[in-house]
């Protein structure tokens, strides 16, 4: 039986408590399905900074590189807000993405029928939503050079960042999105700002060229401002949304919040080969850390994505997803998704219920 | 009695029909209030391209510069989609903004109680929303250099745009936003991506510095991805939102669509001195052009903003706004905001009803 080496990165805030739940469930499903998971634990984020002076210590990156996949919880805490930028917990995420060449960020947005009322949108607008945001993650304005704060001859300063995409960068993320669209609803909407930005013009041109390889996928293009509107107006028009790093940051969060329950949403970040990183969409919620109040479901579902995309265990992934749905169907809820008539439980108990269901 | 010189730019699609309504109402209110409006008509957008080969002919820009304000409808049509970028109707907007140094774009987002049901958001989330997006309009990635599509030695291409803000650019737009916040709810939320972008770091630093001049305004900062979420989750938390050109493009459209009735929303674009441009938030809707179906209200309310911000006629502005509300209270609706039990009317008749109400 195969044994996978997984790097577990708990991070800050609620990270440790939700990761513990996620790991227990992965262990259980591995045992049932007859494969093994060998965990290795690394430091990341504020806790890593405190213990080593570096939010992403080189050993952590090395450990991640040498594993089959990375199972990450969340980083960040108000108490690190005054640190210099390069020491802040979030920088570790950027370092991990660059260090593992994770150019493709996949964010599925779905809503369970039982949770429709948590949305700020009307039932008919949000019910049945099922879209996937594919965000380019190692290029664009996040990494483009030159960047910095520069002082001119007169002594006044200018802040500068550069949004840049090469043809090859667009082509490879486009292929990821088209491949996904082929396995889903066969529709891909590429989002850019080609009426203003040259970088978007090249983006649109290349996405259109790659589309020729996927005759069974219907391609459309949308400007980012319109996409921000259409997500609010009628999100069910979308299947796969493909976009760059910055637009993807904005639109994937907007799309996630449409559901009203971001404590439920997982994500995957993938490279061409090598380990992927699996983590919840939500943050580290330091305000409720250590109180057993966190919702571990996004973490658990991130584990399912890991099984599907990195470990080639789709059957095990499906078992986890079904267990989560079953527990929700029984009326169990953490505080963030609680509504009247349901049974309020904590993070740990939610984990136990899912485990019992497996 | 004072006479104002106003440049009227009808543009494309529904532009001419809604502008006609807006002008008639401005003429009527001017007559009542005892001031004069001298109209001068200029070409802009696709129609300008067709007649002169240029979407923003130099004469139009000159005419705009020599007036007290510019009253613009909308530009664009599918039929110009195949034109080279520099000839497309939307380029005229960028040219007008640069040519008149319109660095401040003001977009109020409000919803009339009668139209709450048009929103895709739940009544309790959207009812009573009243926020103002202040978008920087002549800087950032829209105009930053270098930009273009460049070919490297190996023959592969890269698209490049530059997001840049100087201290002075941030300071002046921040003052506009703080001034507005002082006249409104005394709350300002500055939106950036300072955890990733150096340009945002400078932005945040300068906005914080300018805040010292406005001790009665409560300043907060928010990352753009979070702002995109918070607008969906609980938009009523916002009073004035201050942000850069690109983030403002995305967030102001998202905020507008929250109301479900963008046919109602006006905008103003202002410089340090000289004429401002007043136009609806919605586009040229070529699919319904010439059918008397368009909603002229955003155009009419843009006229009210012009009276308030450029012509110093707040009393006349209020009269228009009250007339619009009264007509809606009587149940008259254009198609885009129609709901059962209301009276469906066309663009022209909506204009007549508002006129009669004045
Ligand atoms: C924390 C931040 C650097 C990060 C990003 O902007 O990518 C986050 O918002 C995300 O989407 O993962
Ligand atoms: C048409 C386009 C150039 C323009 C912009 O991006 O500024 C539009 O979206 C707007 O918001 O006025």
Image (cartoon, coloured by chain):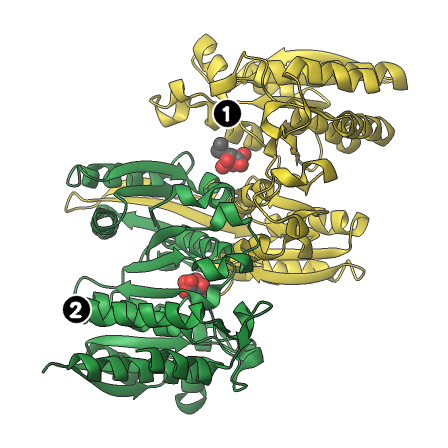
Chain colours: A yellow, B green
Residue at left offset 58%, top offset 53%: A231
Q: Chain of mark 2?
A: B
Of residues A280 and B217, the one drawn nearer to the viewer in this rendering: B217
Quarter containing the N terminus of chain A: top right
| Disc 1 residue crowd, few under 14, some 14–19, many 20+, Cα 10 Å | many
A64 relative to B332, above or below: above
| Residue A6 percent location from the top left of the image | 71, 18
Q: Give residue A92's mark.
A: 1
Quarter containing the C terminus of chain A: top right
Residue at left offset 27%, top offset 71%: B319
Task: Report whether mark 1 lies on the same chain as mark 2.
Answer: no
Q: Give residue B336's mark.
A: none
Q: Chain of mark 1?
A: A
Q: Residue furthest bottom?
A: B51
Q: CA distance from mark 1 to mark 2?
A: 52 Å
Q: Give the number of callouts.
A: 2
Of residues B209 and B288, the one drawn nearer to the viewer in this rendering: B288
Residue beneath label 2, please?
Answer: B312
Displayed quadrant of residue B29: bottom left
Displayed quadrant of residue B39: bottom left
Residue B239 in view in this figure = yes
Residue B56 is left or right of residue A189, and the answer is: left
Displayed quadrant of residue A308: top right
Question: What secondary structure is found at the residue carrying circle 2?
Answer: loop
Question: What secondary structure is found at the residue carrying circle 1?
Answer: helix
A156 relative to A47, above or below: below
Residue B58 in view in this figure = no
| Disc 2 residue crowd, few under 14, some 14–19, many 20+, Cα 10 Å | few
| Residue A349 percent location from the top left of the image | 69, 14
The answer to whether marks 1 and 2 mark residues whose Cβ atoms lie closer than 8 Å is no
Residue at left offset 51%, top offset 18%: A288
């Amino acid at each position: 039986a195969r044994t996978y080496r997984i790097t577990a990165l708990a991070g800050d805030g609620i990270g440790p408590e939700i990761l513990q739940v996620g790991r227990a469930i992965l262990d259980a499903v591995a045992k049932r399905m007859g494969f093994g998971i060998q965990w290795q634990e690394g430091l990341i984020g504020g806790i890593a900074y405190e213990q080593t002076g570096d939010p992403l210590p080189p050993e952590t990156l090395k450990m991640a590189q040498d594993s089959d996949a990375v199972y990450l919880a969340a980083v960040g805490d108000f108490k690190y807000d005054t640190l210099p930028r390069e020491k802040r917990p979030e920088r570790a995420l950027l370092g991990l993405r660059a260090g593992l060449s994770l150019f493709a960020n996949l964010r599925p947005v779905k809503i369970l029928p039982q949770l429709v009322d948590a949305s700020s949108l009307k039932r008919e607008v949000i019910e049945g939503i099922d879209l996937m945001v594919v965000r380019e993650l190692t290029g664009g304005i996040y990494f483009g050079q030159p960047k910095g704060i520069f002082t001119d001859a007169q002594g006044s300063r200018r802040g500068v960042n550069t949004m840049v995409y090469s043809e090859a960068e667009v082509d490879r993320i486009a292929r990821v999105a088209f491949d996904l669209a082929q396995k889903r609803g066969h529709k891909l909407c590429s989002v850019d700002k080609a009426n203003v930005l040259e970088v978007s013009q090249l983006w649109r041109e290349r996405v259109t060229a790659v589309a020729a390889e996927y005759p069974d996928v219907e391609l459309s293009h949308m400007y980012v401002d319109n996409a921000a509107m259409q997500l609010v107006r009628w999100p069910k028009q979308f299947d796969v949304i493909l976009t760059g790093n910055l637009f993807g940051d904005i639109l994937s969060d907007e799309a996630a919040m449409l559901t009203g329950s971001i404590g439920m949403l997982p994500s995957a970040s993938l490279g061409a080969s090598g380990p992927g990183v699996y983590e919840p969409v939500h943050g580290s919620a330091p305000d409720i850390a250590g109180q057993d109040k966190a919702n571990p479901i996004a973490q658990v579902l991130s584990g399912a994505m890991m099984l599907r995309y990195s470990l080639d265990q789709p059957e095990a992934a499906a078992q986890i997803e079904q267990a989560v749905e079953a527990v929700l169907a029984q009326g169990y809820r953490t505080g963030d998704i609680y509504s009247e008539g349901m049974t309020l439980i904590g993070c740990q108990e939610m984990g136990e219920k899912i485990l019992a269901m497996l």
